[in-house]
Amino acid sequence: MSFPIHRPRRLRRTEALRGMVRETQLTANGLIYPMFACPGIKVRKEVRSMPGIYQQSPDQVVEECREVVDLGIPAVILFGLPEKKDEAGSQAVSVTGAVQRSIEAIRKAKLNLLVVTDVCLCEYTSHGHCGVIENGEIANDPSIALLADAALSHARAGADIVAPSDMMDGRVAAIRRKLDENKFTDVAIISYAAKYCSAFYGPFREAADSTPQFGDRRSYQMDPANAREALREVALDLEEGADIIMVKPALPYLDVIARVHERFDVPLAAYNVSAEFSMVKAAAAKGWIDEKRIVIEIITSIQRSGASIILTYHAKDLARWLPRC
Ligand code: PBG
């Protein structure tokens, strides 16, 4: 019946028409670029499985941040590698830690940049788990106290936003309370609310040197088979005081992003994680794909599914490819 009256191709005829009816406009506004800070000075070591991504000392972090600002990217998220690891991840709160030092250096350089910090223990613990171990288990309640201290140390160094990625229960409330008690009421929280136990974190664990030394993260990160449970995790984190919600990984969980977006009227972030990046880089290096088109299509799909904030290692490339506004 509809044809020949209706011809959707009419609106695809020229770029001007396509631009006029385009539903998703990619901009750099929601991009967050992840960076790995390590101890030392003048250290810049490329991560083997993540071309173009480096472990670098605070002085080098600032230099790359200048580039990030020039590209129109509004924010970075910092991950830290400690001088040494121990059972309780005690270096996570060190005032001289690579993350704390990097934040201070960015502040000192007066860069117009939002600084987000990842709050977790896995980079700092000798066993590589995101919490402390008691009787062979990852102990929830003692871990959240340590995470809150780590978040406070980031706030003291000058972070704008802290982002707990550990998946312990109750950590958002513990962090909010700790920040407020110390007068950091304006430091916001992005919670990794629906974080799945994913093989897509593989290259990151090389970058952050955070591979668990025994077992896996299934007792705290979510089962990839569950979507309704993500809604419950999000609801709990919002009750506890999260300002922004995150779903992670992004591409294999677009359905979860869409459902969270539909249900909750809060800013929604998605993390286009390390293996999502490495797979594209590897295929591009082999000449099997058109990297630019693939990246734009992937990031568009994440935004189209409902995430307005996207953490991605492609951020700098993408910002170069997007029209500046
Ligand atoms: C720390 C953390 C991880 C990532 C972000 N924060 C790894 C993990 O949970 O094992 C993964 C990010 C990526 O793969 O790019 N808990």
Image (cartoon, rainbow, N blue to C red):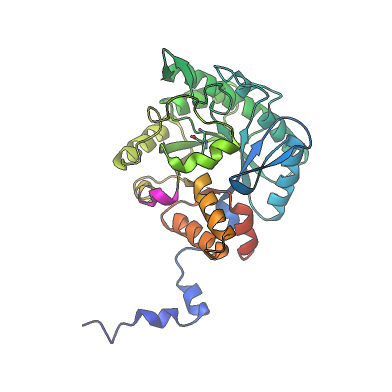
Q: Is residue 101 left or right of residue 169?
A: right
- Residue furthest to the top: 135
Instruction: Kindly indicate the quadrant of the structure image that contains residue 9.
Output: bottom left
Judge whether residue 252 is colored magenta. Answer: yes
Quarter holding residue 87: top right
Q: Residue at x 39, y 48 (%)?
A: 253
The relative height of residue 167 versus residue 181 in the rendered view (above or below) is: below
Q: Position of residue 97 (x, y in %)?
A: 68, 26
The residue segment tinted magenta is: 250-255
Taking the view exactly as shown, the residue that stands out farthest to the front is: 286
Task: Identify the residue shown where x is 31% and y is 37%.
Answer: 229
Image quadrant where residue 206 sits: top right
- The front one of 169 and 156 is 169
Residue 100 higher or lower than 12, as above or below = above
Q: Residue at x 51, y 27 (%)?
A: 176
Q: Is 245 inside the magenta-drawn segment?
A: no
In the displayed structure, 19 sits above or below 299; it is below
- The image position of residue 73, as x and y in percent, is 64, 52
57 sits left or right of 251 in the view:
right
Residue 223 seen anywhere in this rendered image of the structure: yes
Q: Dividing the image into 4 quarters, which one contains the N terminus?
A: bottom left
Instruction: Give x and y (percent) for residue 16.
Output: 52, 78
Name the magenta segment's main secondary structure.
helix
